[in-house]
Amino acid sequence: MGTIYLDNQATTPLAPEVFDAMLPWLKDNFGNPHSPHVLGRQAAAAVEVAREQVAALLPRKGRVIFTGSATEAINLAFGSVRNMAPQGRDQIAIIDTEHAAVRDTALWYRTQGFETKLLPVDRQGLVKMEGLEAFFGPKTALVGAMLVNNEIGVIQPIEQIASLARKHGALMLCDAVQGFGRIDLPDQADLIALSGHKIYGPKGIGALWVRDGVDLPPLIHGGGQEQGVRSGTLSPALCVGLGMAAKICAERRDEDGLHIAALAAKARDLFSDWTVNGALDQRYPGNLNIRRDRLDVARLMSEVRGVAFSAGSACASGSGRPSHVLAALGLEPAQIKSSIRLGFGRYNEIEEVERAAHLINQAAESQLS
Ligand code: PLP
């Protein structure tokens, strides 16, 4: 029996339609999309179709810039603060529980003369709306807020945060990596980052949506590709893969949503002895972060080899650092160490969730007895 894959927040398998769409661009259609001859023009046309497919899921009145990852898209977006600094805007505000791609970038800007503030969350993992406005002012350049938390799955009140950012003249960056193609995106964001490999697309490609009128300095200098901000030859195969993945997400949104909700409901039932970390309702159901007191998760993971899942205690960005997200919820170190994250996706079946729950619960019981 193969491994049961329940780690869809870390990455998702490639959709078969995406693989089929990419193949010709890896084989015979090898033209450089920036060449003026026929092979180049064909590749460029495919890239533009993909751009439209991604744009179709994003707000209108903006442009899509392809990047190598969501992390790169986020780094590109942060460049906007350089343009804001001469207007006296030298503050950045992000939610305390952002993914390292946002958090570490925001903290790095402290070394560039910016002040970075961390917006606190409550015990549910939701940003504390009360008193939030005190964090914004005429010096705020950029507000970074994620749509769905990658570790605990909670959905942040993005529209409200975006309204506050707008009220104070700041730009709003939404890290939509875990929500893109699944739940509604904020209308008021100025910058939205997404990633191919979280939506059943390929690894090695992401995108940044930029609202019309928002100026970004180049992140990568060179031949001037991607509207001059991200030079380098694009991979038509990766662009086509991301475009197709986005298209399928849009077409299957309701179907995928129902399927994942059913998997999650089954799991909540089967793990009823565990405590859910984070808000119970305001969450994306495909993410279940749960804990059982006194459990040694490192041991559990080595015992349950047939299931690919994640230790809630290690930062889910893969850095191996202890989870700053669970700590921000106020969990004790022992509780953090006894947490696991299960991620359900389009290709999981109910039987897999049942089998995984059986294996995990069995190992947990024998450890705790
Ligand atoms: N933001 C969130 C919320 C994520 O979950 C991830 C990936 O884990 C990223 C950003 C980074 O995405 P990428 O792997 O495309 O750089």
Image (spheres, rainbow, N blue to C red):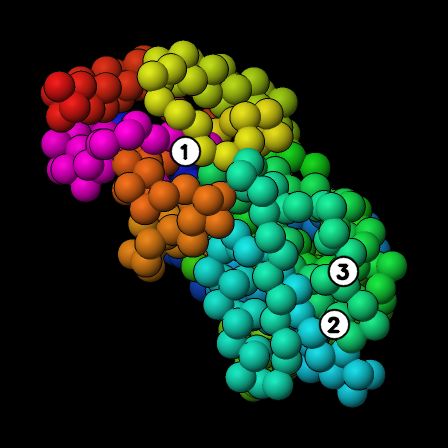
Residue lying at the far right in this picture: please name it: 167
Task: Please give left or right for residue 257 compared with residue 52 in the image.
Answer: left
One can see residue 172 in this view: yes
| Disc 3: residue Cβ within 8 A of ligand 1's nearest atom | no
Q: Please report whichever mark, 3 or 2, sits nearer to the chain's N-terminal start.
A: 3
Question: In the rendered structure, which segment of residues is drawn in magenta?
Answer: 287-313
Residue 86 x %, y %: 78, 87
For label 2, the crowd category at 10 Å Cα-Cα, with few meaning under 14, some 14 to 19 and many 20 or more, is many
Q: Please report whichever mark, 2 or 1, sits nearer to the chain's N-terminal start.
A: 2
Q: Please report whichever mark, 3 or 1, sits nearer to the chain's N-terminal start.
A: 3
Quarter containing the N terminus: top left
Quarter containing the C terminus: top left
Q: Residue at x 66, y 64 (%)?
A: 93
**Marks 3 and 2 close (CB-CB < 8 Å):** no
What residue is disc 2 on?
141
The secondary element bearing badge 2 is classed as: strand
Instruction: Say the numbered circle drawn on residue 289.
Output: 1
Q: Nearer the viewer, residue 114 or 262?
A: 114
Residue 295 x %, y %: 22, 32
Q: Residue at x 22, y 37 (%)?
A: 297
**Marks 2 and 1 close (CB-CB < 8 Å):** no
For label 3, the crowd category at 10 Å Cα-Cα, with few meaning under 14, some 14 to 19 and many 20 or more, is few
What residue is disc 3 on?
134
Tell us which disc is closer to us: 3 or 1. Answer: 3
